[in-house]
Amino acid sequence: QVHVVESGGGSVQPGGSLRLSCEASGYTVKNGCMGWFRQAPGKEREGVAVILVDGGSTYYADSVKGRFTISQDNVKKTTVYLQMDSLKPEDTAMYYCAASGFFVSNGGYCFAVVPRAGNVNWGQGTQVTVSS
């Protein structure tokens, strides 16, 4: 059984930084993907950044390119991080980590399918608030 746990959210002023961590224990899917998705009140869940677990390829939403960086632990590939710099008020949301229960060929596919697929392991979410 896969257990996904996030940590690292909090409140920060615009322009500040936060680092989120996610560990997917028990995850054994070959060529799956892990990533971060966020949901603000009244809005749909959207992709932020994803990484292919076995290849390391990454994919980002246009709104966070150049500001956010997703990475994985060098030893334990099922631990991923999201470094968020130059945060903006519009980044305020609940951030969820997800680990696909299926093969993923590329980051764009992961980005598009994971929010809608049934065979996905989700964490409980961590709140990120950006305000002055």
Image: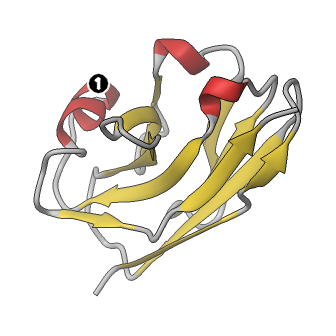
Name the residue nearer the viewer: 4 or 33: 4
Residue occupying image coordinates x 29% and y 52% = 32
Question: Three-letter amino acid code at disc 1?
Answer: Gly
Percent from the top left, x then y, of residue 87?
A: 76, 28
Could you tell me if residue 43 is visible in this image?
yes
Q: Answer above or below: position of 92 versus 77.
A: above
Q: Quarter-wise, where is residue 10 in the image? A: bottom right
Is 86 left or right of 58, judged from the image as shown? Answer: right
Percent from the top left, x then y, of residue 78?
A: 50, 64
SS label for mark 1? helix
Residue occupying image coordinates x 69% and y 54% = 20
* Residue farthest along the bottom direction in this orientation: 1
Q: Answer above or below: position of 25 versus 93.
A: below
Could you tell me if residue 73 is visible in this image?
no
Residue occupying image coordinates x 15% and y 45% = 116
Q: Which residue is mark 1?
A: 108
